[in-house]
Image (spheres, helix red, strand yellow):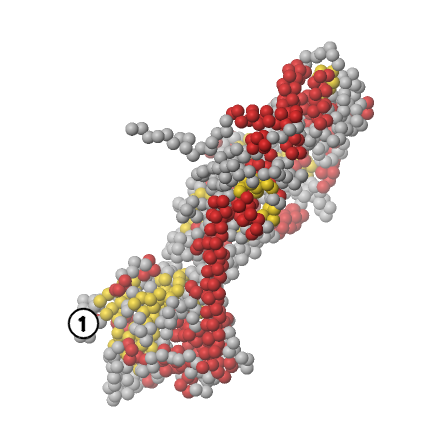
């Protein structure tokens, strides 16, 4: 069974062919009788058309079609009233409720201000330590007011403790420390300096326990013991104890924390050249040296040395190997008491893992810090990633419970009973089974002392929480009240908007259901289709506006029916009562005047079409030159041709010129036919009258339509003027002909073969190019090319007033296929011409022969001269040399004839008289170079070259600067690599340029081999002006691949640690901080220089810092 055809199912109903004829008959009848009947109105205004059903689009030619004004049921649109609800509420802005904590047990995050993840992770580690938090909260208000850093830290902790916000703004605290938001720093260095600052700042407190928070929690002591192998005595310095706040452990070639501790506390033998001088033995003897732990802090921090120095590349590299560490760490046997009479440790020293600081990223110079911290109250692990805080469960990497496949955790493993280097697990060696973890990114480990040794909860020593200070309670409550009100206000506004949108949608559906006019209902109204469409698709519609479908008489004309819809009286009343506006256009408001005028125009168009068709043959005869014996008139030939090409129904517009406008001279008479655009033909009187009447009916001013019978004489004044112009052009034509005959070879532009010892003359290449254009311009455009400037004036301008020498150089010589020629140019330099041409120029341009610039081709006389001038001779088309030794470019040397091989020894050059003034030229070129190098926001092109070397086209193309060349602003990919245009200024540094290239191509700065031509661009602190890089230059860069690729481009946007004015600022977290390691040419690492962390004094004020 065949399927039914659906080919024409969705096509609009085709209007019958007899509809147009019936409309034309109606208009013709109205024009003849002036009578308008109701059936005529129904037909002309398309009232007869049925109500449309199921159109995909709203039909303009049917006023009864209301389809597609709203989407189908369950459908949506991208904008307006019918878009999805979640898209509608986006206009309200972000939901404040989403920034609130999900529950009171969820910790708050800290905002990343650009590159402050290193500080955020450390601050979270300190805050989650309840003992440290309690000590900070115990500070008296007077101290907080006097010491800003303590005030801001306490305030930050108070918000983290009791604020309802899901993340806290860290800007006030970072500003107090005077840190640069855009510079990534090392978290370990930040912790060390910050604890030192806190020690100094807490000394201003009057509470003794608060003064020693840092020392009590983080400070331990070690001694460096050197023991004589001969007498067994320790050195005097061995008794000295040094404080430490963290232990820095090597992890290279080590797998476990126990191995790193063993290495840290291992004994070193001092032998040979490293022998120790023993005071007791009074001689250099063998000895041993080691580090001994004398006391351990409550919080034991291990700094893992993940960065190693590479002497070969003078850079640092990150160690990304997996490193294991236990959940609990027994440090009892590693502690050595200073008094040997006492036991090594009076009580077990068991530590439990409390925090892990993680550095994400494959290299030392970039990356991102996050912290995994254990809540001391709930024993749950949390991941602190700036604003985002995620629960991990009972394990630090959350992998045992949820088996996460998150790519941010792909380098982290959970291990149980991980084996040590001797094949046994460390738990087995201690006789217990201990849970082990490992990570490729762990940068710092924090362990907290468990006094009972039975669990982590014992670490708090009964202090289960740190209550909020009373002087912060009111402030935090006010803030929480504001947050709460903001969320409630947003929810109320959201509910009101959604309710209003729902009401509007129901209103639109209700009105459109009432809009179709019922058959037989004689009362209806016209409404603007554009307003109706906007009303049905806009959340907040405007007042009803029918002015778009009104005519000048205030009615609705037939011409506006396609822009209007016919709606029922009920629908009109609903819209009018709610939105006002108008005017009301009922079924009786059709415009009689416009209808009669339209009927008249329609009939006139039919008459015009028929009349033009009958006269078309006469116009064709006139254009063919077939004259008539009857009276005839001139019309423009071009105008008549265009008139014939127009359709019969297409009448002339008001803006068009008349048939004789181009034949009328400025004096109001007939223009001579020899004038430009004055070609005319004679047409019969019948055709002329039709053209005249047709044009006159469309013009209010008849002055531009003049009648010129064929016996009309041309304007005498214009004839005289044209004769004079023709005479001048004739003289000019003869002069140019003579010049072309005199300088036949020079005009051809072919290279002149130069002979040594023969006298020549020099003229400016720019003047010669203009002269060629002038003398070769002939025909109708003979006067269009301007005459070049006086040759005598040009020659005089070439002389410097100070030295009376030439201010320009001859173009360089080229040796090719056994002959000497000169390079060509149309803008710069002096061109050699034969002596005979110069003498003719003197005669043609009235120039004294003595003012000529003579020259000849001569050779260097000796090998010594050759050696002296070797630097000025161009082997491969470089710039010209001094005036007495103009260069020669040697091409195709493999094809040189044997007799000319002496050119390899004795080189030709151009000897001029007068000589070239190198002093003045140097000053001029220096000034021009400075102007070219003073640019702002210009484009240069950088090409990423793949392969062993750059193609010759790129090397040569980037070696020279052409100020006239055009460059595309689009990045393109070619066969040799990627191209990109960068916007730079003369003050942009090479460092900044390399950072742009890094971001564009993903090639790290240290791997970039940047070139202009054959010259490598070095020196990061130099500017582009220092390196003679001009706008439009093409540079090329290669990736040396010496260093590892950093985490950029594909994963995160990387910012430079300096302010790159040519780059778009960003607040991305992945940043770059430079580490020099003594590498020459790199920027010196600033670190925390200039901040409060490195200041020797603590800022103390008398101001009140209690307000947020």
Residue drawn 42% across the image and 83% down it: 138
Where residue 149 appears, as percent x and y from the top left, is 48, 77
Q: Which of 828/22 is in front?
A: 22
In the foreground, 884 or 922: 922
Q: Quarter of the image holding residue 598?
A: top right
- Which of these two is toward me, 90 or 143? 90
- How many numbered marks are there? 1
Q: Secondary structure at mark 1?
A: helix
Q: Residue at 35%, 84% (x, y): give it.
A: 240
Horizontal side, residue 603 vs residue 162: left or right: right
Q: Circle 1 sits on which residue? A: 428
Sort mark 1 into few (<14), some (14-19) or many (20+) by Cα contacts within 10 Å: some
- Residue at the outermost right position: 716
| Residue 775 drawn above or below residue 874 | above
On screen, 824 above or below 1027? Answer: above
In the image, 295 versus 571, the foreground residue is 571
Percent position of residue 834, x then y: 66, 30
Q: Position of residue 576 (x, y in %)?
A: 57, 49
The x and y percentages for residue 169 are 46, 69
Residue drawn where x is 39% and y is 59% of the image: 313
Res. 860 in view: no
Q: Is residue 523 visible?
A: yes
Quadrant of the snapshot with the N terminus: top left
């Amino acid at each position: 069974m065949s399927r039914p055809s659906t080919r024409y199912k969705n096509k609009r109903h085709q209007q019958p062919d007899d509809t147009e004829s019936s409309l034309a008959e109606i208009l013709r009848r109205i024009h003849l009788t002036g009578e308008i009947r109701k059936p005529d109105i129904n037909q002309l205004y398309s009232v007869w058309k049925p109500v449309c059903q199921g159109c995909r689009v709203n039909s303009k030619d049917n006023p009864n079609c209301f389809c597609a004004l709203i989407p189908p049921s369950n459908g949506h649109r991208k904008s307006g009233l019918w878009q999805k609800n979640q898209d509608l509420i986006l206009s309200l802005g972000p939901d404040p409720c989403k920034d609130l904590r999900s529950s009171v047990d969820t910790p708050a995050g800290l905002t990343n201000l650009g590159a402050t993840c290193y500080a955020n992770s450390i601050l979270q580690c300190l805050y989650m330590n309840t003992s440290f938090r309690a000590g900070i909260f115990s500070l008296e208000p007077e101290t907080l007011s006097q010491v800003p850093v303590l005030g801001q830290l306490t305030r930050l902790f108070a918000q983290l403790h009791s604020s309802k916000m899901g993340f806290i703004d860290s800007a006030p605290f970072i500003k107090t420390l005077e840190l640069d938001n855009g510079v990534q720093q090392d978290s370990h260095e930040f912790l060390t300096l910050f604890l030192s600052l806190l020690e100094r700042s807490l000394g201003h407190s009057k509470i003794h326990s608060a003064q020693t928070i840092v020392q009590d929690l983080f400070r331990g002591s070690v001694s460096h013991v050197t023991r004589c192998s001969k007498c067994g005595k320790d050195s005097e310095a061995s008794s000295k104890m040094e404080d430490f706040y963290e232990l820095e452990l090597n992890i290279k070639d080590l797998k476990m924390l126990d191995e790193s501790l063993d290495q840290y506390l291992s004994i070193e033998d001092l032998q040979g050249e490293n022998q120790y001088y023993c005071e007791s033995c009074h001689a250099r003897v063998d000895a041993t040296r080691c580090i001994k732990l004398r006391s351990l802090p409550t919080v034991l921090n291990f700094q893992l040395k993940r960065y190693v120095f590479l002497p070969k590349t003078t850079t640092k590299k990150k160690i990304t190997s997996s490193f294991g560490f236990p959940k609990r760490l027994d440090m009892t046997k590693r502690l050595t008491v200073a008094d040997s009479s006492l036991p090594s440790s009076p009580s077990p020293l068991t530590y439990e893992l409390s925090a892990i600081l993680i550095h994400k990223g494959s290299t030392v110079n970039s990356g991102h810090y996050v912290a995994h911290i254990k809540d001391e109250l709930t024993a749950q692990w949390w991941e602190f990633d700036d604003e985002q805080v995620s629960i991990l469960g009972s394990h630090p990497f959350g992998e045992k419970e949820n088996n996460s496949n998150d790519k941010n955790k792909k380098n982290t493993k959970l291990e149980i009973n991980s084996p040590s280097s001797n094949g046994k697990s460390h738990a087995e060696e201690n006789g217990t089974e201990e849970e082990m973890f490992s990570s490729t990114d762990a940068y710092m480990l924090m362990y907290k002392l468990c006094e009972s040794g039975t669990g982590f909860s014992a670490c708090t020593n009964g202090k289960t929480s740190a209550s909020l200070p009373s002087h912060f309670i009111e402030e935090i409550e006010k803030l929480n009240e504001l947050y709460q009100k903001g969320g409630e206000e947003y929810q109320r506004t959201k509910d009101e908007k959604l309710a209003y949108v729902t009401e509007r949608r129901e209103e639109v559906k209700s009105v459109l259901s009432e809009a179709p006019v019922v058959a037989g209902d004689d009362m209806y109204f016209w409404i603007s289709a554009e307003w109706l469409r906007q009303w049905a698709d806009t959340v907040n519609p405007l007042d009803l506006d029918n002015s778009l479908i009104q005519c000048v008489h205030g009615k609705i004309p037939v011409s506006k029916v396609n822009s209007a819809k016919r709606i029922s009286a009920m629908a009109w009343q609903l819209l009018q009562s709610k939105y006002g506006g108008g005017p009301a256009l009922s079924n009786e408001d059709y415009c009689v005047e416009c209808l009669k005028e339209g009927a008249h125009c329609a009939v006139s168009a039919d008459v015009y079409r028929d009349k033009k068709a009958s006269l078309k043959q006469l116009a064709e005869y006139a254009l063919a030159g077939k004259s008539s014996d009857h009276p005839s008139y001139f019309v423009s030939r071009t105008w008549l041709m265009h008139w014939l090409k127009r359709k019969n129904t297409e009448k002339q517009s008001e803006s068009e010129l008349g048939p004789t406008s181009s034949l009328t001279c400025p004096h109001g008479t007939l223009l001579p036919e020899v004038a430009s655009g004055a070609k005319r033909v004679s047409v019969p009187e019948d055709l002329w009258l039709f053209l005249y009447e047709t044009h006159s009916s469309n013009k209010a001013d008849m002055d531009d339509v003049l009648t010129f019978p064929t016996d009309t004489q041309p304007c005498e004044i214009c004839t005289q003027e044209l004769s004079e112009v023709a005479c001048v052009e004739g003289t000019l034509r003869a002069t140019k002909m003579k010049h072309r005959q005199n300088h036949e070879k020079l005009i051809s532009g072919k290279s002149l073969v130069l002979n040594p010892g023969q006298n020549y003359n020099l003229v400016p290449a720019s003047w010669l190019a203009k002269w060629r254009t002038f003398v070769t311009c002939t025909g109708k455009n003979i006067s269009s090319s301007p005459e070049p400037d006086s040759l005598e004036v040009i020659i005089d301008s070439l002389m410097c007033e100070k030295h009376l020498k030439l201010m320009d150089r001859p173009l360089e010589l080229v040796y090719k296929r056994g002959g000497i020629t000169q390079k060509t140019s149309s803008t710069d330099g002096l061109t050699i011409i034969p002596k005979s041409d110069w003498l003719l120029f003197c005669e043609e341009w009235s120039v004294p022969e003595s003012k000529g610039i003579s020259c000849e081709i001569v050779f260097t006389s000796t090998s010594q001269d050759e050696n002296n001038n070797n630097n000025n001779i161009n082997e491969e088309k470089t710039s010209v040399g001094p005036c007495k030794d103009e260069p020669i470019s040697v091409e195709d040397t493999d094809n040189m004839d044997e007799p000319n091989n002496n050119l390899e020894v004795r080189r030709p050059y151009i000897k001029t008289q007068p000589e070239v003034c190198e002093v003045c030229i140097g000053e001029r070129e220096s000034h021009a170079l400075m102007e070219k190098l003073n640019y702002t926001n210009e484009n240069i092109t950088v090409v990423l070259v793949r392969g062993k070397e750059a193609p010759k086209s790129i090397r040569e193309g980037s070696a020279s600067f052409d100020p006239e060349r055009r460059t595309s602003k689009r990045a393109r990919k070619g066969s040799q690599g990627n191209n990109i245009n960068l916007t730079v200024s003369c003050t942009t540094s090479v460092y900044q340029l390399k950072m742009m290239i890094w971001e564009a191509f993903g090639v790290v700065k240290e791997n970039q081999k940047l070139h202009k031509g054959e010259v490598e661009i070095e020196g990061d602190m130099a500017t582009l002006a220092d390196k003679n890089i001009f706008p439009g230059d093409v540079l090329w860069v290669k990736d040396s691949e010496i260093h590892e690729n950093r985490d950029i481009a594909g994963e995160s946007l990387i910012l430079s640690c300096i302010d790159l004015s040519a780059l778009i600022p960003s607040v991305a977290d992945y940043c770059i901080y430079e580490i020099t390691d003594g590498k020459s040419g790199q920027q010196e690492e600033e670190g925390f220089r200039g901040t409060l962390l490195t200041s020797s004094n603590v800022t103390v004020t008398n101001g009140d810092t209690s307000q947020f």
